Image (cartoon, rainbow, N blue to C red):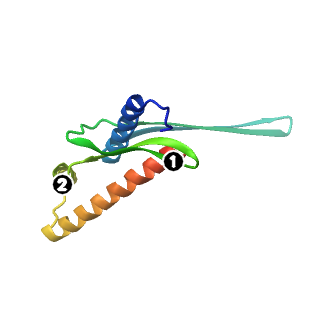
Amino acid sequence: MKFSGNISIDQKMAVANARLALAQQIETRIEGLDKTFSNRTDANEETTVGATFSSVSKQLTKQTLNGSRVIKADVVEIGGKDYFCALTTLSPALTKTLFKDLVKESKKQINPQDEQFLYQEFKAFKAEKDLEKEIARLTN
């Protein structure tokens, strides 16, 4: 988030945004509605055709982040402007617990070797998404 000069407020906002981004990576429910309306009118040997399309969606995130913590916060320069950034993460133990819960919810049987591989992939994916969201937030 753009640095305002007030570290107290900027830090609270940056941490709140970082925790939201973290929660969205764990679980986001999306509702969407697409509407299409088409019409055709024939009169006096003339045909008129019309169509409209609209799309609406909303994303809801509800996730408890017990043990989330800020591991780094700083003012950084990006594109010649100062931004206050906060990196928020779950502890390694909680990340492992979250992964096990996700595997359990999937109701899939996974052998221990594959589970370890998937866990490493999960951590890498989570870190990549954290970075992408932070970059997108800072550059928009």
Q: Is residue 46 left or right of residue 19?
A: right
Q: Which mark is residue 95?
A: none
Task: Identify the residue position indicated by label 2 in the image.
Answer: 96
- Foreground of the two, 83 or 98: 83
Local crowd size for mark 1, using a 10 Å CA cut-off: few (<14), some (14–19), many (≥20) = few
- Please state the horizontal and vertical placement of residue 14, each as a whole percent of the image: 40, 37
Query: What residue appears at the point 58 percent right and 47 percent down from the top-left corner?
Result: 80
Earlier-in-chain disc, 1 versus 2: 1
Q: Left or right: 68 with respect to 24?
A: left
The answer to which of 3 and 134 lies nearer the viewer is 3
User: Tag 2, which secondary structure?
Assistant: helix
Identify the image quadrant of residue 27.
top left
Q: Is residue 140 visible?
A: no
Query: Residue 105's x, y, as percent?
Result: 20, 50
Give, as a three-letter code, the residue at label 1. Answer: Glu
34 or 95, nearer to the observer: 95
- What's the residue at 34%, 59% (across, down)? 125
> How far from the left and from the top, in percent, is residue 70?
29, 43
- Location of mark 1 (residue): 77
* Callout in the foreground (1, 2): 1
Neighbours of disc 2 within 10 Å: few (<14), some (14-19), many (20+): some
Distance CA(mark 1)–CA(mark 2): 34 Å
